Image: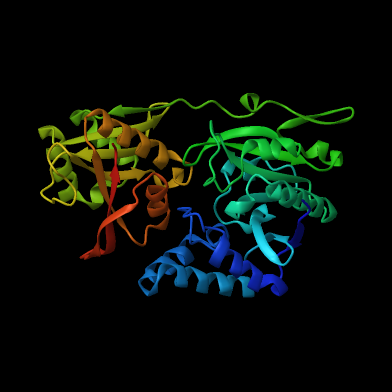
Amino acid sequence: MKYEIKRLNPDITTAYLDFFDNKAFSDGNPNGPCYCTSPNMNAATEQKMVSEFGNGVKETVRRYATQMLANQKIHGYLAFDGDSPIGWCNAGDIDSYARWIPEYSRQNAVGKTVSVVCLCIAPEYRGMGVSSALLQRVIADAKKDGYSAVEGYAKILKDRDNYDFTGPARLFEKAGFITVAKYEDNGERMIMRKILYSAERDKLTVGEYNKGGIVQTPYENTIPKVEHKITRLAPEDYCKCANIWNMDNKPEMVQKWYNELVSGNRIIFVYTENDEFIGEGALVFENGDPDYTIKGKRIYLSRMIVKLERRNHGIGGIILDYLVNYARQLGYTEISLGVDKANVSAWQLYKKKGFDTVIFDGEDEHGAYVKLLKRLD
């Protein structure tokens, strides 16, 4: 089947909104409603948007998307079957994305690069070549516009996942992309790159020129190996968590958490790289709030934090998976947590990891927050 691919422009704004209004998440996809605003938003704008969710989540996101479209802040391509929009690809200059781009890509660019950060296909059109058609158009326009490379950021998956919005590795491999690095971001991912011009060979930092074209070296030879592990924290090592967060700012809480650690009511796990403390997370057996803990049934996930300069690298997802699995091994059937509504990235992570039941929505002295629940059985 032949599809028409159109680069996003003011003339198809209505079609763009129609796609996200009625088609993109018609199967209950948990990534919606998004209108693909986050990739082109900075953290402050996203937090402001979330603070207005009381007016309706979908309505608020749509209003922000409409404004971004008017200001040409969203970049990409719509796929059409006749007059009906059936697929979307968020793609643009790598420097147009304040977030979502792994640091390795920025530090090891091979010249002007187009990043493909999101693919969303209407459920009834999946597996029918729409993603391939979108990607081929991205590549063709990148060549025409003088770009040196196109990059994708595929999650490493064993099975097909219709909710994975970055596109499967096989999609990029089929289009001639090569894996140049692996990294962590809510699961293991690959930086997949397609070089467009051999004239860029002298600028390559992760490849070598071979007669007949570019031959990129395996990612194992281009990235320093980092050993990470997660271990249970001993009370005598609690002070080392100061490498993760400023313990001087919350002396009363530090003492409270330490007392719980010593008593055994709190167990803390730390994520380390080459023995450096990078992140931590804790499980609490009893905290006096029946929303959070029920003896023998529900355990509370508390105080998950990653060192500031190491955030948005997937470490939080690794810690979260570990804590959930540990709670399951202890025999618990439910795990709870609380998250500030303004903490958009954390809330999205928890949603993707299955914390999809809201058991409380309100405010305290620190602001608006929700209590979330994940069932483990």
- If the image is split into quadrants, where does the C terminus sit? top left
338 in relation to 63, above or below: above
Residue at x-position 68% and y-position 44%: 151
Residue 231 image-quadrant placement? top left
Q: Is residue 40 left or right of residue 9?
A: left
Residue 185 visible within the image: yes
181 in relation to 114, above or below: above
Residue 240 image-quadrant placement? top left
Residue occupying the far right of the picture: 212
Residue at x-position 42% and y-position 47%: 352
Report x, y in % for residue 127: 65, 44
User: In the rendered view, how is the structure colored?
Assistant: rainbow
Q: Is residue 49 left or right of residue 97?
A: left
256 in relation to 222, above or below: below
Residue 278 visible within the image: no
Marks counted in the figure total: 0
Q: Is residue 360 left or right of residue 34?
A: left
Report x, y in % for residue 143: 82, 50
Residue at x-position 25% and y-position 30%: 233
Residue 243 image-quadrant placement? top left
Give whichever of 92, 220 is nearer the camera. Answer: 92
Q: Is residue 34 left or right of residue 323?
A: right
Report x, y in % for residue 297: 17, 39
Report x, y in % for residue 182: 58, 33
